[in-house]
Structures are given as structure tokens and as C-alpha cells.
């Protein structure tokens, strides 16, 4: 990674961290324990990949800063809520997240469940802030995030994942599951960034951006599956080898480790090719695709 890109990424991560801290309820506000759990689950960890994508896509459209940050925070809060719920005993049952005890371990299951619910509500509240964008566009942004989060997106993908434990899936079935569970929110992060500016993209440009976002959403999951087999728990910040132990279908179990790695490289190349025609405006998105494909830990 170039020094310029690293500096940009660090600056965005810092801006997002500060903004999250300012926009989450204070621990001093009642109910204090719930607010403490919300802040615990969101702050002080994570690579902020989804906000980075929102910021990078915003560079294509001269994004309005107040709209861009609201979109980035909304996506990150939805992501954080999903991690809390994924770790619960009734879901993936994991005790570790981002190198720390999972929210339900640090607090309790009921508080963790409510923290996830409250983070989801806060995400939509932030994106509904009056004056962020033209009202019609703001409604479209809210609808985009809602679809990505619901039964046809992230929540539905998790349901398919839970129903697939111990059952072999073919590649189209696996890709559909992850297009919903992981890819839908990554796609939303990109498209919300593109919707946050003053410059409208053409229909052809939106199609290219949509294809890019779908490829990197799938890329993220393929790399995740590879890392689950090759990285340590200390490196990942979550329990390594959990998917294999739970007999869950993954790209590694379907394709084998080396073929999964090759598939990740193919997806990376496809994602970059989709941005042809945007010129230097897409440089941040291309660098983020590289970061996702070759994630350093």
C-alpha cells in the first residue's frame, strides 16, 4: 500500500471512530448498561471497511460530507449489530470478537440482543436526519439500507447459513448465501456513498459500480473463508477454524484452499475491471479492493 493510501485510510478510520463516539448514546444516559454495551460493540475495533468503501465511492460524486458520514456510520452500525447477534449462542455461538469477549460474554445475552436492536434503530435514525440530501434520494438511501439488512439481504443470508450447517452446497447456492449475508451490506456501503454527492452517475456508471460492489462483497467472504483456515485466533481477533468445526459450507470446503485463493484473485481482477472508465476517481475503490483481497493483519 502506498503511503498516500495508508494516510487516507487512517484519516477516514479516525474520522469515523470520532463520529461514532459522538453519535452513540452516552453511558451516562439511561439505560446506562445498554448504552455501555452498544459503545463496547462498536468503538475501538474493526477495520471500518464498509465506511471506507462509502467514502471512496463518494469520491466519484463529490459527496456532501454530512451525507457521506451519515451513510458510512449507518452501514457500520448495521454491521456492528449483525456481529453482536451472530455471536449469540442461538446463532454462531462465539465468545470472541475483535480480540475481546463478545458482547454477550462481556455483558449478558439479553443486553447484547437489545444492544444489537438499538444499533440497528440508530443506523436508520442517522440516515433519516433531515437535510442530508434531496428528500426523494434520502428515501431511496433508506430503502437501500433496509433491503440490504433484511430478509432478502443480511438477515436472510444468516438464516440460509444456519439452515446449511452439515449440508453440502454447490457453488451457486454458496454464492447466493454470501451475496445476501455479507455482500448485500458491502454493496449498500458502495451505493450509499455514490448516492451521497452532488454529481449524479449515469445509468451505465451505476451498473459498473454495482458490479464492482457485488464482486468485492463476494471477494470479502472468500478471503474470510481462507483466513478462517490459515490465520490464528490471535491474528483474526475471533475464533479461528470455527466454520470447519461447525461443519458449515465455505469456499475452502467446496473448492479447496488453493482454488479458493485463485478464485479470490479472479474476483479481485473482475472488480477492478468493472471500474474501467472512471479514471483516477476510482483509485480509492481499486486500492480498497486490493486491501480486501490481500488483507494485512
Image (cartoon, rainbow, N blue to C red):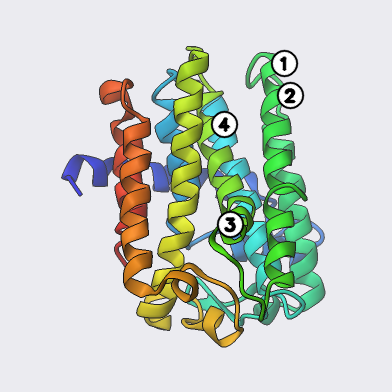
Residue projecting furthest to the front:
170
Residue 268 position, x and y percent, is 34, 48
Of the 4 image quadrants, the one containing the C terminus is bottom left
Pointers 3 and 2 in contact (CB under 8 A)? no
> Which residue in the protein does label 2 denote?
139
Q: CA distance from mark 4 to mark 2?
A: 12 Å
Secondary element at image label 4: helix
Q: CA distance from mark 3 to mark 4?
A: 20 Å
Mark 3 and mark 4 lie on one chain; the one further toward the N terminus is 3
Secondary element at image label 2: helix
Secondary element at image label 3: helix
Few, some or many residues within 10 Å of mark 3 (<14, 14–19, 20+): many
Q: Could you tell me which residue is drawn at 50 percent across and 77 percent down?
A: 238
> Which residue in the protein does label 1 denote?
135
Few, some or many residues within 10 Å of mark 1 (<14, 14–19, 20+): few
> Which residue in the protein does label 3 denote?
178
Pointers 3 and 4 in contact (CB under 8 A)? no
Pointers 2 and 1 in contact (CB under 8 A)? yes
Q: CA distance from mark 3 to mark 2?
A: 26 Å
> Which residue in the protein does label 4 denote?
192
Residue 25 position, x and y percent, is 70, 51
Residue projecting furthest to the bottom:
245
Asked if residue 248 is positioned above or below residue 203 in the image, the reply reads below
Q: CA distance from mark 3 to mark 1?
A: 32 Å
Question: Can you tell which quarter of the image residue 129 is in?
Answer: top right
Q: Nearer the viewer, residue 44 or 213?
A: 213
Asked if residue 212 is positioned above or below residue 152 in the image, the reply reads above
Amino acid at each position: 500500500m502506498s503511503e498516500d493510501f495508508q494516510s487516507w485510510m487512517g484519516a477516514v478510520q479516525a474520522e469515523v471512530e470520532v463520529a461514532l463516539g459522538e453519535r452513540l448514546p452516552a453511558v451516562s444516559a439511561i439505560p446506562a448498561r445498554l448504552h455501555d454495551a452498544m459503545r463496547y460493540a462498536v468503538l475501538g475495533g474493526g477495520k471500518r471497511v464498509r465506511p471506507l468503501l462509502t467514502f471512496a465511492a463518494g469520491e466519484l460524486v463529490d459527496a456532501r460530507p454530512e451525507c457521506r458520514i451519515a451513510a458510512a456510520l449507518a452501514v457500520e452500525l448495521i454491521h456492528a449489530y449483525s456481529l453482536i447477534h451472530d455471536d449469540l449462542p442461538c446463532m454462531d455461538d462465539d465468545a470472541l470478537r475483535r480480540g475481546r469477549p463478545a458482547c454477550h460474554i462481556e455483558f449478558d445475552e439479553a443486553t447484547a440482543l437489545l444492544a444489537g436492536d438499538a444499533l440497528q434503530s440508530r443506523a436508520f435514525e442517522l440516515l433519516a436526519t433531515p437535510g442530508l440530501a434531496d428528500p426523494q434520494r434520502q428515501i431511496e438511501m433508506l430503502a437501500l439500507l433496509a433491503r440490504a439488512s433484511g430478509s432478502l439481504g443480511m438477515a436472510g443470508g444468516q438464516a440460509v447459513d444456519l439452515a446449511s450447517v452439515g449440508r453440502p452446497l454447490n457453488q451457486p447456492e454458496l454464492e447466493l448465501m454470501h451475496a445476501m449475508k455479507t455482500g448485500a451490506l458491502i454493496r449498500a456501503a458502495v451505493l450509499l456513498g455514490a448516492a451521497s454527492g452532488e454529481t449524479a452517475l449515469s445509468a451505465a456508471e451505476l451498473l459498473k459500480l454495482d458490479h464492482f460492489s457485488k464482486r468485492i462483497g463476494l471477494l470479502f467472504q472468500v478471503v474470510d473463508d481462507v483466513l478462517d483456515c490459515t490465520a490464528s485466533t490471535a491474528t483474526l481477533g475471533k475464533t479461528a477454524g470455527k466454520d470447519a468445526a461447525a461443519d458449515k459450507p465455505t469456499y475452502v470446503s467446496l473448492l479447496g484452499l488453493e482454488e479458493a485463493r485463485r478464485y479470490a484473485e479472479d474476483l479481485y481482477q473482475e472488480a477492478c475491471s468493472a471500474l474501467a472508465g472512471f479514471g483516477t476517481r476510482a483509485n480509492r475503490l481499486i486500492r480498497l479492493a486490493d486491501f480486501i483481497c490481500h488483507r494485512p493483519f
